Every structure is written in C-alpha cells, then in structure tokens.
Amino acid sequence: MTETRKPIISGNWKMHHNHFEAIQTVQKLHYRLENDDFDLVDVSVHPPFTDIRSVQTVIEADRMKIELGAQNCFFEEKGPFTGEVSPTMLAKLDVKLVIIGHSERRQFFGDTDEWVNKKLKAVLGNGMIPILCCGETLEEREAGQAESKVDSQIRSGLDGLIPDHVSDMVIAYEPIWAIGTGKTATSGDAQMMCAKVRSVVADVYGNDVAQSVRIQYGGSVKPGNIVELMNQADIDGALVGGASLDADEFAAIVQFNQH
Ligand code: PGA
C-alpha cells in the first residue's frame, strides 16, 4: 500500500445470504464502521444478484458509504441469453463495481480470457469499475508457472482497453490454492505477485497507469493476516470471501489501520 492509492476492501459473498440475510449483514456492517473508516478505505459488498435490489434500497435509505458490487455479468446489453444479467441492468441498480473473471467463474462456468475481456469492456462501457481477477493453481505454482499464468491473464484481460479505464480499475490477485482453504500466500509471495501484475500493466500501459491501478490480494484474508498483507508496497486492498459474510469479521478487516 502506498499513500497515493486509496485502499479498497471488497466482500465477495459468492452464493451465500438470501436477501433478508444480505440486508441484515449490510446494516450490521454499516453500524460497525465509522464515517472516518470510509475516508481511509473504499468498502464494497458483492451480494448474489437476487439480493442486489434489496441491498441497494438499504444503502440509499441510510445513506451508507458502502459501495454496491456484483459478482459477474454478461457482456451483451440484452437479448436471448437465458439466465444472464446485463451490465446495463446492474448500472441501473447503482452497482459501482463488478467482479470479472473470478477463478470460480473460469473453473465452473466456462469464462475464458476472451469473455473476461468482453465483460471488462461492457462493465466499463456502463460506467462501472471492474475488479479483474487473476491467479494460478497449485500445480501451476509448483511447476514455476505462477508468473506466466498471471502475465497472460492480465494481458488478454486488458486487451484493447483505453489507458484511462485501466487507471481506474481494480485487479485482484487470487492464488486459487488459497481461496477458501485457510491457506494464505505469505505476504512476501503475495507482494511479489502483485508487483508482477503491476509490472505487466506498466509494460502495456506505461508507468503512470500502473501506479494508479489498485491491486487487491484475495485468498483466505482474515482479521489476523490483513495488516501484514496491507503493509506490502503493491497490495492496495483485499478481495475477501468467507470472512466477509460476517459483519464483525469484515469490519475488523476494513479497520486494519486500527490493529
Ligand atoms: P476466501 O475467498 O476469502 O473465502 O478465500 C476469496 C475469493 O474467492 O474472492
């Protein structure tokens, strides 16, 4: 983390919390956080699609500073795409950030690098900020291919984007073997990979863009490991799964400055 990039901590709720539970969790999070916290850190929650309208209503009614996010979307605006949700629909619900290319989407739902690229363009085209996910499997790490995997995911993900859009984006480095496993990358390994991500952005878009893009680490982030992660120069935030479902635990992560 550096002084110039504002940290961003995002809660990826995955397929958890129905809309009643989502409302309760966001309200509890709002009460646990102080106004000052939002001066220091951007905070977003990414509920399932069925919860988004409910959470939007609560955020607006209570003028919360928590930002509304989504976990995915399709790249077309409308059409015969049964089961899909368009970026236009999300923007209409005041969604600000959309996670794109999460490893679970790539693994279970067939999201390819090409689709990830189209989705990024669609999200940006609708005035929202994408959180582009990248990361290697355990086999790739053990074979010494972690850096080349992330390098190619970033290059193909960002292909054809304009520099201004890339500056505003968030990229999440999430080693797949650390997601939901309780195993976190060491802060040194996480830093090395986030620095790698930044260097790829610099290679394609130049140093100014690379210095402004915010890079999150994701994979078993907890109140007990967030401080060390945030102390790394190229880690500007966290994408938090399991620990974001509980408002107390997520608030403790957001308030890493106070530990
Ligand atoms: P986790 O998930 O914090 O439960 O490991 C992170 C993610 O998949 O975004």
Image (tube, rainbow, N blue to C red):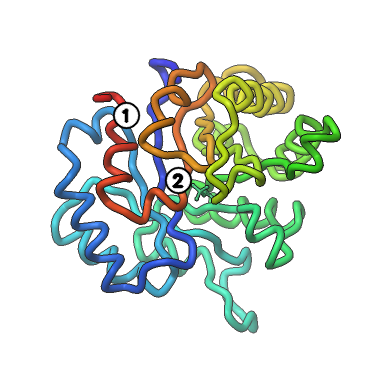
The x, y position of residue 162, in whole percent, is: 63, 37
Question: Which residue appears at 63% of the width and 24% of the height?
Answer: 189
| Residue type of the residue flagged with mark 1 | Phe
The x, y position of residue 5, in whole percent, is: 43, 23
User: Dot 2, how many residues are within 10 Å of its Cα: few (below 14), some (14-19), or many (20+)?
Assistant: many
**Is residue 105 shown above or below 34?**
below
Q: Is residue 125 left or right of residue 92?
A: right
Q: Is residue 258 left or right of residue 179?
A: left
Residue 222 figure quarter: top left
| Residue type of the residue flagged with mark 2 | Val
Where disc 1 sits, the SS reads helix
Given the current orientation, which residue lies at the most extreme right position? 143
Of 209 and 148, nearer the camera is: 148
Image quarter in which the N terminus is found? top left
**Is residue 205 shown above or below 59?**
above
Read off the residue under disc 2: 240
Ligand 1 within 8 Å of disc 2? The answer is yes
Image quarter in which the C terminus is found? top left
Q: Is residue 116 left or right of residue 147?
A: left
User: Dot 1, how many residues are within 10 Å of its Cα: few (below 14), some (14-19), or many (20+)?
Assistant: some
Kindly report the distance in space between the C-alpha atoms of the residues bearing marks 1 and 2: 13 Å
Going from N to C along the chain, the mark reached first, 1 or 2, is 2
The x, y position of residue 242, in whole percent, is: 44, 52
Residue 9 figure quarter: top left
Given the current orientation, which residue lies at the most extreme front position? 182
Question: Which residue appears at 45% of the width and 45% of the height?
Answer: 240
Read off the residue under disc 1: 256
Of 209 and 140, nearer the camera is: 140
Q: Is residue 191 left or right of residue 128?
A: right
